[in-house]
Image (tube, rainbow, N blue to C red):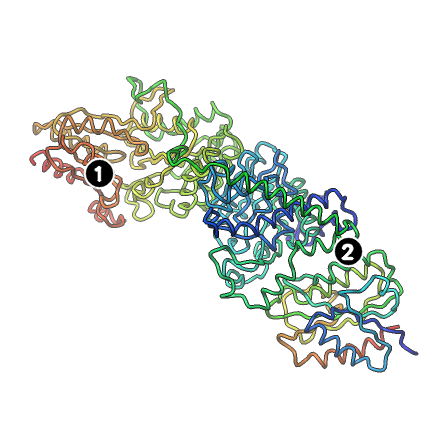
Amino acid sequence: MIRHKLQNMKVLQDIPVHKIFTIKNTDKAILEKWFYLMTLGRMIDEKAPNYLKQAIGWSYHAPYAGHDGIQLAIGQIFNRENDHLFPYYRDMLTNLSAGLTAEEIILNGISKAADVTSGGRHMSNHIGKPEWNIHNVSSATGNHTLHAVGVGRAIKYYKGKGVVISSQGESSVSEGYVYEAINGASTEELPVIFVFQDNGYGISVPKKDQTANRKVANNFSGFKNLRIIHCNGKDVFDSMNAMTEAKSWSLENQQPCIVQANCIRIHAHSNSDRQDLYRNDAELGYVQESDPLLKFKRMLVRYERFTDEEILTIEEKAKEELKVAHRNALASPDPDPASIYDFVIPEPYPASKYPDGLHNSNGAKKKLIEGLNETLKAEFRLNPDTFIWGQDIANKDKGGIFNVSKGLQKEFGPSRVFNGPIAEDFITGTANGMSRYSKKIRIVVEGAEFADYFWPAMEQYVEMTHEYWRTNGKFSPNVTIRLASGGYIGGGLYHSQSTEGALATFPGIRVVYPSFADDAAGLLRSSLRSEGPTLFLEPKALYNSPAAATPIPDDFEVPFGKARIRREGTDLSIITYGNTTHLSLKVAERLSSEGYNLEVIDIRSLIPLDKETILNSVKKTGRVLVVHEDKVFGGFGGELAGIIGEEAFEFLDAPVRRVGSAFTPVGFNRILEAAILINEEKIYAAALALLKY
Amino acid sequence: MIMKKIGLFYSFASKKTAKIAGIVHNAFSGEDIQLINVDEVKKEKFLEFENLIFGVPTWFDGELPNYWDELLPALEEIDFSKKRIAVFGLGDQKGYAENFCDAIGIMVDFFEEKGAVIVGKIPLDGYTFEGSKAVRDGQFVGLPLDQENQARLTNGRIEQWVANLKKEFN
């Protein structure tokens, strides 16, 4: 095939689709398989609402009837040896066609423990089989496009033989992340097929309210390296030809392709939707008349490929399979409520060389930024399946906004160390995606230039925290999200704020916030060797601070959930982390000269939390001051204070106090910044008040 | 010269297309024109005519209606090389501006490949739309009619079209 490298967009979109499959030339056995799958699929599709009516389950069912051609085709061209498939919530026939059994579909629908998608944890109709590379996708519909692009990146890097197929409804293309995904696939030239199943509605919203083009795929006609194919998703042959063409195109050209399949939605959006409220009888009538299954059946008989009797036999066989599948699924056990804590996050790397994350090295002191940089390099040398990307991360001598990744691209090359676009959600989402390709892969992303620019990536951040639990332990994104956090640099909004109060509320991710170079290095090593996601918050004000510089053993490791007592004392426990560790140590020193002996605990790791060290300290001192840079209201200190209040109340001689920043944004003018952020004086005053309580 | 008989093929079950077919039929009054229901037609019927008119609305975002789509494979082996074919179709220039009367173009593609001479092409004047498979070399390869937005122009357009067909048909 000619590689259309210098094509203009029009040429790419005008390439005709090869007509490989027709009613006359398609092998009878293939036609029989297709008709069987379509018949069985439709029987399940029509039976699904009955489970809800009988209070068995399947409370969410989005019928696929009207998408039959394209869904059959997606499943048929998918090869689980090499391809990856991201089906959406309406893709029941896609899954069946890709090889799932009727029983597996029903087990998902009624949320049984044996559900191969999620063990009953994820919503019904979100069908997949991760072990076959049929991914379990989010209800945030269309956000799997970013994951698909991430897998595409891995296929390209590892020279895989497959393609990625991402499927979604046309309305979810309105989501910004879909544009980011397709832009990325186009820029990086990745073998990803984006299928838009266009039934004209996003629940009740007609597509004219989504975008100006009736065919939303045409919105992408200016994207380079991207082929766009339109097909009739109601027609088996047109859909098979389109998907076959798309796959061979993407494989041969290593470029993305959009297939927009025109479908109809015969039924309501789901069983909670009443389509008679917004579709008139005429419309409902003509969609019924355009039923793809009936059309296919008519064609099979009209062109004498099957007799009426043969058709009936196939339908009877499907009916029988459904009956058995139904019976087996009903008898299958429900999930065990005691299992809810299974697979929240994988067990981390044990860090057995330094089980407490402590060392006695007396070597030369290194700055925090050096600790991070050298650990990244060491781990990249050790593990060839490591990657790092982000904004501003690699251009000659530039290595990240603060140069943490300086020299990485030179040493490890642009395939492992590269810039991302200014699209935080894309940066984060493709990390989730790429790590699906192999368990060996470890990815580091600079999630944003500054931590408080990370908000556009929140949906992918949340997604990352769900994956392991939602797949019942079948997939964990092995990703370290690095963010340069906090203030004291005169940066103002989006450059100085703390984010951990918001980011630590999601089960399914580790959150660490070191304050010294050695801990930064040790925690980063643990992150890079662990399965599961880690949010790695870096106090940017300390990158080059002499106060944060320490000796760092070459192989230093800090396990998650191990606090470090930075100063031992008996009169008051300061529980802190990040920038305020240093402020607290100064206050402790100052109060020491006034006769008080303060203990300063740097928790290092917010999740998991070392409750034991904290509570032991409280028991010893009886007085606790929780200190952090983030706002007091809604800050992580609320959790710390709550735990201490609940679990060590009887040891307290004074109320637990919290100090942090004001409940305002962070101002740019240095005077405003100083007034808002916590400082030594505020900690001193609070500590003294507690000591005198 | 006496015009050879004409076959006017359309779906009798359709509403708007059937109505238009009636007007076309009337415009040929005095000629030997036969109405054929494509819902039930056998492929042999197409052999009976040298002049054929097809009525084909555009469905959805640029598709043939099922009754034509399911019929075309049956016509693949027929030699249309001595036949003159004209196509009219209904579309919506505003609601479906990107695919205005695509079905006309799809039909013409099919029958041209089978050797037919396509007649009844008309200029684009008077239409406003964004894209159409029915447009080739700056003209429509058949007669697009828009009952949604330009119903008042329909009779005149048919009259003009039929007048031309009378010259172009065998």
Q: Given this view, does label 2 or label 1 mark the residue nearer the observer? A: 2
Q: Is residue A490 visible?
A: yes
Q: Amino acid at mark 1?
A: Gly
Q: Residues within 10 Å of mark 2 (few under 14, many from 20)?
A: some
Q: Amino acid at mark 2?
A: Arg
Residue pointed to by mark 2: A302
Mark 1 falls within which chain? Answer: A
Q: Dividing the picture into quarters, in which one does residue A282 lie?
A: bottom right
Determine the CA span between mark 2 and mark 1: 73 Å
Residue pointed to by mark 1: A642
Q: Residues within 10 Å of mark 1 (few under 14, many from 20)?
A: few
Mark 2 or mark 1: whose residue is earlier in sequence: 2
Q: Residue at x 88, y 74 (%)?
A: B5
Q: Is residue A18 left or right of residue A261?
A: right
Viewer-proximal residue, A599 or A42?
Answer: A42
Q: Is residue A517 left or right of residue A252?
A: left
User: Horizontal and vertical percent for residue A381?
Assistant: 47, 24
User: Horizontal and vertical percent for residue A329?
Assistant: 52, 40
